[in-house]
Amino acid sequence: MDLKALYQDMIVEHSRHPRNFGKLDQPTHTMEGFNPLCGDRLTLYLNVNDDHVDEARFEGSGCAISMASASLMTESIKGRTIEEAETLYHSVHGMITGSTPVEDRGDVGKLQVLEGVKDYPSRVKCAGLCWHTLHGALSEPEQDHVTTE
């Protein structure tokens, strides 16, 4: 199976059956994200203890790419330190925008399937919404929302 087919299959699977969808009781970090370009919205809930992301969940509505990216992200950040989650944010952001060469982005694992959005500039912000929301929740928790603009 080629990467493009894998990309499509995984995006469809995660958008139809998002992992970690729903509100988290008593989160330590909460951040709302909004993509004004297309209307995608999500709220990210994190439980961070001893510098580790113990739990990650999200609620929201948006296109298949936005929901799939959030599902993949929440799976990928659980158990990571804040620093590792931030590094992953930068790697994925560089990958989906095409701004970071492959050799400089590190191991993104199954998140590699999101690389295909770089070929569709109008979809980059859809895939990046949850990642910007994560970055805001971890680096600027005093804010209550972020946008892709």
Image (tube, helix red, strand yellow):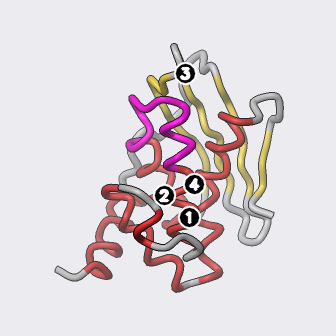
Q: Which mark is residue 69?
A: 2
How far apart marks 1 and 2 lie (CA) works out to 5 Å
Amino acid type at image mark 2: Ser
**Which residues, given as a range, are shown in magenta?**
75-88
Residue 111 located left or right of residue 61: left
Label 2 neighbour load within 10 Å: few <14, some 14-19, many 20+? many
Quadrant showing the N terminus: bottom left
Nearer the observer: mark 4 or 2; the answer is 4
Residue at 74% from the left image edge and 61% from the top image edge: 148
Secondary structure of the residue carrying tag 1 is: helix
Percent position (x, y) of residue 90? 57, 54
How far apart marks 1 and 4 lie (CA) works out to 13 Å
How far apart marks 4 and 3 lie (CA) works out to 19 Å
Name the N-terminal-most of marks 4 and 3: 3
Label 3 neighbour load within 10 Å: few <14, some 14-19, many 20+? many
What residue is disc 1 on?
Answer: 127
Nearer the observer: mark 1 or 4; the answer is 4
Quadrant showing the C terminus: bottom right
Name the N-terminal-most of marks 4 and 2: 2
Amino acid type at image mark 4: His
Label 1 neighbour load within 10 Å: few <14, some 14-19, many 20+? many
What residue is disc 3 on?
Answer: 48
Q: In this rendering, is residue 8 above or below 46?
A: below
Amino acid type at image mark 1: Ala
Nearer the observer: mark 1 or 3; the answer is 3
